[in-house]
Amino acid sequence: VIPQLWSIGIVTRFIEPKSKYVLRDEEIPGAHNEIKSHTITSKYVVPMPISLPAPSAQSSRNSFSRGAHVLALYPGDSRFVKGVVSAAPGDSGGRRSYVVTFDPAELNPGEAPSAAVPASYIVALPACLVEQMYLQGNGG
């Protein structure tokens, strides 16, 4: 299975006849990436709010229970990585972030398998990935 790259981007154009978006990668401060442009189909676009709440802010849009499959912004990078919520904010110790265990197939060598991720940098796993997980027998 080839991992898919999910990153933060800004829609710069919609190509209506093809139902495709042109996205510009958005660099996160401290991330090591170059700005690129991509043309992708709408099933791979996950809308984000125009402005993000404070990193510790939580709402129904980003409220996940332990075991939830999510896309989470990998710390210090601008890419979202598939993962599973290991601990939610407020679990023991008054944690303000989620602890996400990332899919090892999506990580680069030497990257931590789990990390604390602020609630505003986690989104529900897109339907196309949920479907892919179930087709591969990993939906559990």
Image (cartoon, helix red, strand yellow):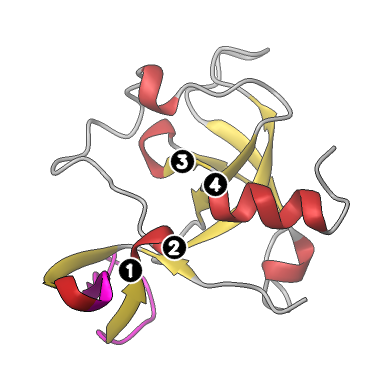
Q: Which residues are magenta?
A: 18-36
Looking at the image, is mark 2 or mark 1 earlier in the sequence? 1
Image quadrant in which the C terminus is located: top right
Q: Quadrant of residue 106?
A: bottom right
- As rendered, which of 31 and 22 lies closer to the eye? 22
Quadrant of the frame with the N terminus: bottom right
Kindly identify the residue that appears in the image at 84 percent across and 50 percent down: 138
- SS at circle 3: strand
**Would you say the residues marked 2 and 4 are in contact, meaning their CB atoms lie under 8 Å apart?**
no
The three-letter code of the residue at mark 3 reads: Ile
* Residues under numbered marks 2 and 1 in contact, where contact means CB atoms less than 8 Å apart: yes
Are there few (<14), some (14-19), or many (20+) residues within 10 Å of tag 1?
few
Which amino acid type is shown beneath numbered disc 2?
Gly
Secondary structure, mark 1, is loop
For label 2, the residue is 76
Q: Seen from this angle, which residue lies furthest front? A: 17
Left or right: 35 with respect to 43?
left
Q: Quadrant of residue 136?
A: bottom right
Q: Secondary structure at mark 4?
A: helix
Q: Is residue 23 at all visible to an observer of this figure?
A: no
Residue type at mark 4? Ala
Q: CA distance from mark 2 to mark 4?
A: 26 Å
In space, the residues marked 2 and 1 are separated at their CA atoms by: 6 Å
Give me the C-alpha separation between circle 3 and circle 1.
19 Å
Q: N-terminal of the two: label 2 or label 4?
A: 2
Element type where label 2 sits in the image:
loop
Q: Which residue is mark 1?
A: 30
Q: Are marks 1 and 4 in contact (CB under 8 Å)?
A: no
**Circle 4 residue:** 127
- Going by the numbered disc 1, the residue's amino acid type is Gly
